[in-house]
Image (cartoon, coloured by chain):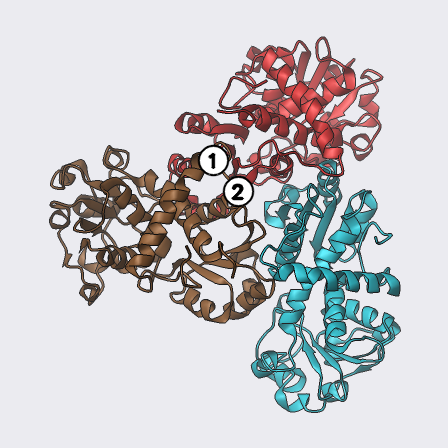
Chain colours: A red, B brown, C cyan
């Protein structure tokens, strides 16, 4: 079975059937990573370019490991080593890569929409590994995979997404994804971190974290992205932690079997208390493990068959 | 068939028969990059070190992809991660690499002659991926491959090389290569960018771009290498573009089936107008595709047989 | 045969039997690197993460080549591309890597003890590739391998370690290793570079380099690690060279079949005269070649069997 798409650019453009196919595929591929020999020959002879314009440990490493476990060849390009420093346009850099016949280009870029533009320029499959404040579809897919794995379903669950909604591509992609799969989503954060007209996504908004946590099946805490905020949108980290951080105390209002999630890297003691991040409800490391499986699934579905 | 050389350091040291063998081999290997499974086992178990002291997207990526499509193992070293920062001499760094038994070392270095010195120090094959303002033999080979592929021959063609001749290793290697293969080469650029005594290479020089373009079969536009010029050798980019840039207007004097080439990365609107770079005569992206094939050919010819 | 350990963190925690097993294994794997096809399928499907927080050419390259010659998949993370720049703790970064199911994590870190902490956090094997001024066990193992290969034994040899003892993890690991294997070790360096109470390791100390060299079977010259010294611990490089550098003159007091070693990168003309580094007693490049063999041996012994 294959996905009838060239690219994975955002959650908006995936149907519920496609999302289910991706999650099912990831479920079945996940086991490969626990074998003594963690490798299948599925994508032997495929060339995958990882093109990362923003620093990333987990996403780049996750994609690289996914590619290698499927036996693909990988080449990695970062902003600092690329011709970007010589003034080449992004479109030209990517057209040049394309001329080397890669099968997929995985791109992370600080400019929202960059992957979409590139996808139109090239025959290769493009996977968006995060673009500006716009989308991070593989994160949303691994988050949905993690919830479905633990809860058995997505439909009808109450999902709270808490933090810097305005600057978070994770928030945006997860909101769209969970709503699409029939979950209820509530967004919470300080007024300075809630964008205007965010309700059009279909999720209610609150400035009170307690309201979002109440009866939540899933809580997704967002990273305070210090590197994106200028000036800082709340008086201090301590103040943020006391009003919007997830702690043992405010967590008590959630459902007994709540799942705590975070896209990482976490700021311990800011948006999440260490005892919550490391506690029994946390599935943060499951998210990371499932990230490899989701990326294997996408590469397999996009590149696995004859083209 | 093999090439009877340990290293590929410059075009000067290749015979016309060797150049033809390389181009023929590249022609036949090019097809591998268009297969669903882009990989042959030819260089399995070979170790190739990519040692890049200058930033490069296309050349490094091209070499890496070439190596992987031949199933070689690759290790990449850049100036910033290397012991150069600890004060080790280049010769010592390379002797150390050599002690790990690589089969080939691909080197790009800002110092002219660095690859030649290294080649004498090591048993491994050394391929020059660009040294200072001296040579860039793989670029010249891929350019000749591209022209031969489109025109069916090199002999007798009129090749114009236009731009910053003084600072361009591409100009030098291409001039030597095309002349060796029987083409006519004419060099053009502003007086500040034409080195003294360049005529000894055997190509006439003009300061008038129109003269070079007239009746050209091939036009190779050089990159304005802003990063190498201090102070800048012409008053402004706009002025450079108006006097020396390739435009739809001045291109009209070339032959009807002219080929437009550029080693990349291009400065759109400076040395080449966007509509020319993207126009029907441009083979800039063919050059990139052929770059992979040329590098596969060199690795195959140097390492492919028993040593 | 396997080593009954999860991790290789320091020489202290290895028994003499384990050290001998590692050296024997390295001796037998060394031959692979001289074959036309330098690759065995032993670790196919294993994932090895190279996590380097300090710049390194030889150690990182050596580990990568070792992994690839055993057919393992490798992923490389450096400090500059990692989430460290986003404020993630080292423990969280490593827990995240662990969630992707690597088989081994190779870590170099500026903080002494970092690898030990990580080893307790993860199921994966951890190999210390150098931590602060603490330990560099793979360097000591490759040094012992080199001496045993040349001398046929370690027991009873007189080993002089000369230079900046205080800032050298190489000095510390080698002192412990050679003493454990029955060699005599003498440490020499300027008073400002000899740590307090270093005698507890079991090696006598002298401030006179001639005393250490006298009758030495093996001389290990340490690198003057300019990047670690603030302020500089001796008046000038020239003065250091004249008092503590190894030269043809002071080398005459050593045994006729002395071995000259250096962990690299060398500062020519500072701690070692060029004619000594390149001379007949130098086994500096043998050390590098054996480094690949030792790392292959460790990966094989830790990961080679069913776990």
- C58 on left or right of B24: right
The crowd level at tag 1 (other Cα within 10 Å; few <14, some 14-19, many 20+) is: many
Chain letter behind tag 2: A
What label does residue A102 carry, if any? 1
In the image, is residue A185 above or below residue A167? Answer: above
Q: Residue at x 28, y 42 (%)?
A: B149
The residue tagged 2 is A75
In the image, is residue A248 above or below residue B210? Answer: above
Please tell me which of labels 1 and 2 falls first in the chain.
2
Can residue A224 be seen in the rendering of this structure?
yes
Secondary structure category for the residue under label 2? strand
In the image, is residue C242 above or below residue C147? Answer: below
Residue C272 horizontal/vertical position (percent): 62, 80
The answer to whether mark 1 and mark 2 are in CB contact below 8 A is: yes
The residue closer to the viewer here, C213 or C118, is C213
Q: Residue at x 65, y 78 (%)?
A: C234
């Amino acid at each position: 079975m294959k996905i009838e798409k060239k690219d994975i650019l955002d959650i908006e453009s995936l149907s519920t059937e496609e999302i289910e196919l991706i999650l099912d595929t990831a479920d079945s591929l996940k086991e490969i990573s626990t074998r003594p020999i963690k490798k299948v020959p599925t994508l032997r002879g495929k060339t995958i370019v990882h093109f990362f314009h923003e620093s990333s440990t987990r996403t780049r490493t996750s994609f690289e490991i996914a590619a290698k476990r499927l036996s693909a060849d990988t080449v990695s390009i970062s902003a600092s080593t690329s011709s970007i420093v010589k003034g080449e346009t992004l479109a030209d850099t990517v057209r040049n890569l394309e001329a080397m016949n890669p099968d997929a280009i995985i791109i992370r870029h600080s400019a929202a929409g960059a992957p979409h533009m590139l996808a139109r320029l090239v025959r290769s499959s493009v996977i968006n590994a995060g673009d500006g404040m716009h989308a991070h579809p593989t994160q949303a897919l691994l988050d949905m995979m993690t919830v479905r794995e633990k809860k058995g379903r997505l439909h009808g669950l109450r999902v709270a997404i808490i933090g810097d909604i305005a600057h978070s591509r994770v928030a945006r992609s997860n909101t769209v994804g969970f709503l699409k799969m029939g979950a209820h989503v509530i967004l919470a954060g300080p007024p300075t971190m809630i964008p205007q007209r965010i309700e059009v996504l279909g999720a209610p908004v609150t400035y009170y974290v307690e309201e979002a946590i109440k009866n939540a099946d899933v809580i997704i805490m967002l990273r305070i992205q210090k590197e994106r905020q200028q000036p800082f949108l709340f008086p201090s980290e301590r103040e943020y932690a006391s009003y919007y951080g997830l702690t043992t105390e405010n967590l008590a209002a959630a459902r007994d079997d709540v799942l705590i999630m975070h896209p990482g890297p976490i700021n311990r003691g800011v948006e999440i208390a260490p005892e919550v991040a490391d506690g029994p409800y946390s599935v943060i490391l499951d998210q990371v493990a499932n990230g490899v499986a989701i990326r294997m699934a996408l590469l397999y579905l996009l590149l696995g068959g004859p083209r």
